[in-house]
Amino acid sequence: MNQEEIMKILPHRDNMLLLEEVSREEDTARGKYHVRGDEWFLKGHFPENPVVPGVILCEILAQSACILLADQMTEGKTPMYTGLNNVRFKSPVKPGDTFETRCRITRSKPPFYFAEGSGYVGDRLCLKAEFSFAIVGA
């Protein structure tokens, strides 16, 4: 899926739609975001040594789960983070990097969904996390 197709599932827009593409391979979502270097979140994080903030990496990871729940993401529904657990940042993500995610749903009790995921630059593990969210009405 490209960004236009992702927008049919996720309500995120403008600067907060961070996922550029996503695909599904069986029960795993794989997403991508290329860090250009001019993003709003790099302006002050950190001058002379830009690093993508960890919360942004976690957001990209969660957005990549969208393809796994496309059927539940009907119009007027919004995915809301309900938890982040066992988050580990292993390596920084910097301008020029392509951050790639892999995540899967581990269990569900609608409207709550629980997932685990990881983020890489090439073969280098940058992030591991467990997260949960609820899909709520408007």
Image: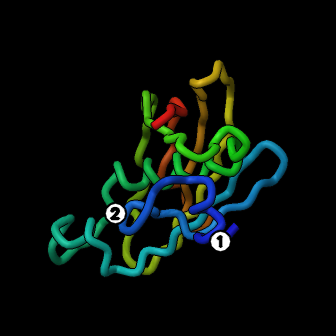
Residue 52: % across, % down = 34, 63
Q: Quadrant of residue 21 in the image?
A: bottom right
In this rendering, is residue 89 above or below 82? below
105 horizontally vs 52: left or right: right
Please tell me which residue lies in front, 107 or 123: 107
Residue in the image at 44% along x and 50% along y: 59
* Amino acid type indicated by mark 2: Val
Residue in the image at 50% along x and 31% along y: 136
Badge 1 element: loop
7 horizontally vs 41: left or right: right
Residue at the disc numbered 1: 2
Please tell me which residue lies in front, 50 or 131: 131
Residue 41 in view (yes/no): yes
Residue 65: % across, % down = 62, 46
Residue at the disc numbered 2: 52
Residue 132 in view (yes/no): no
* Amino acid type indicated by mark 1: Asn
Q: CA distance from mark 2 to mark 1?
A: 22 Å
Please tell me which residue lies in front, 17 or 100: 17
Instruction: Decide which of tag 2 and tag 1 comes sooner along the chain.
Output: 1
